[in-house]
């Protein structure tokens, strides 16, 4: 069977260096009988290694031309299930049934990596750990410390709910077609349950508003937040009063705030907006 070419519109860059494929699977360390979700299996470089380790693989592939390739290679394997769908629309908790939880491995297209990360955070109850190959700049962003220029909404979101670490870099030459950027393999592990009463949705919207325009102060950004969010600020006495109550200098920028300060800001707003 002729292998389909990578599609630019899907951001495809197939991993062809087996040594890096093995390092990714070693980084995950799948156990025999464990369910693993593979997002974007492509031509099956990681899939074959996962099945070889005895894992039950639930592969999610959007590219219709790759489906017959994957079915020809792995369709007869009892531990292989293929879901032809957009990973951004898949309910992972349902897809991994009868398993209650699973780990994720993926060589993520650069153009959807941020959206996939958000999706994995949302569904961390059933996919609590992921080993992901991402553009190196994305990993630098999600691991950026307070005060770093790379720090943004994605940094705060991921750090609030997951512990993350960079494992190793992958050069452009490990892929076909060869991308213009380096990649980094990172591990994300879900943290424990949030404190009782923590409003996750409010937290996300508050952080998003705070980073709306990175060059502006946190006060200016909150003052220009969506109308319904501003209404909550008013119940708490206004954006300036909210920051004062949280002991946050209104002239600081969002990237300077720590995780604890974002959580405290959310808690204060939740209490003040009632």
Image: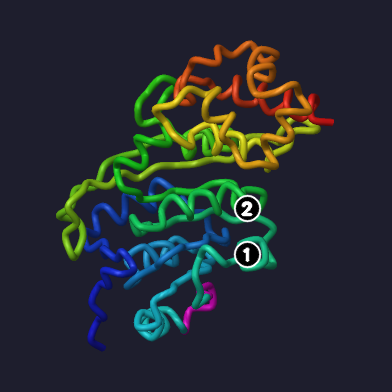
Residue occupying the far bottom of the picture? 1
Label 2 to label 1: alpha-carbon separation: 8 Å
Residue 203 vs residue 197, the one in the foreground: 203
Quadrant the N terminus occupies: bottom left
Residue 91 badge: 1
User: What is the x, y in percent for residue 140?
Assistant: 34, 35
Q: Which residue is mark 2?
A: 123
For mark 2, give the secondary structure. loop
In the rendered view, would you say 60 is above or below 20?
A: below
User: What is the x, y in percent for residue 78?
Assistant: 54, 78
Residue at (50% x, 55% y) in the render:
104
> Quarter of the image holding residue 179?
bottom left
Which segment is the magenta one? 76-82
Crowding near pointer 1: few (<14 within 10 Å), some, many (20+)?
few
Q: Colour scheme of this structure image? A: rainbow
> Quarter of the image holding residue 89?
bottom right
In the rendered view, would you say 38 is above or below 158?
A: below
Residue 89 vs residue 36, the one in the foreground: 89
User: What is the x, y in percent for residue 97?
Assistant: 67, 67
In the rendered view, would you say 212 is above or below 63?
A: above
Crowding near pointer 2: few (<14 within 10 Å), some, many (20+)?
some
Residue at (62% x, 48% y) in the render:
124
């Amino acid at each position: 069977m002729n292998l389909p070419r990578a599609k630019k519109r899907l951001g495809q860059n197939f991993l062809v260096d087996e040594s890096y494929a093995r390092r990714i699977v070693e980084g995950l360390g799948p156990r025999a009988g464990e369910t693993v979700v593979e997002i974007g299996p492509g031509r099956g470089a990681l899939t074959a290694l996962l099945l070889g380790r005895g894992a039950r693989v639930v592969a999610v592939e959007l590219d219709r031309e790759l489906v017959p390739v994957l079915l020809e290679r792995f369709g007869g394997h009892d531990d292989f299930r293929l879901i032809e769908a957009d990973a951004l629309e898949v309910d992972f908790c349902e897809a991994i049934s009868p398993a209650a939880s699973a780990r994720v491995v993926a060589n993520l297209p650069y153009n959807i990596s941020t959206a996939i990360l958000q999706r994995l955070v949302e569904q961390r109850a059933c996919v609590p750990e992921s080993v992901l190959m991402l553009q190196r700049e994305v990993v630098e962003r999600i691991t950026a410390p307070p005060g770093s220029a790379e720090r943004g909404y994605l940094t705060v979101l991921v750090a609030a709910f997951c512990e993350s670490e960079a494992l190793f870099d992958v050069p452009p030459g490990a892929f076909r077609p060869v991308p213009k950027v380096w990649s980094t393999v990172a591990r994300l592990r879900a943290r424990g349950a949030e404190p009782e009463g923590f409003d996750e949705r409010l937290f996300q919207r508050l952080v998003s508003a705070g980073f709306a325009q990175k060059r502006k102060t946190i006060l200016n950004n909150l003052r220009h937040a969506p109308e319904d969010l501003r209404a909550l600020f008013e119940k708490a006495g206004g954006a300036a009063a909210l920051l004062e109550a949280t002991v946050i200098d209104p002239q600081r920028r969002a990237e300077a705030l720590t995780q604890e300060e974002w959580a405290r800001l959310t808690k204060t707003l939740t209490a003040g907006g009632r």
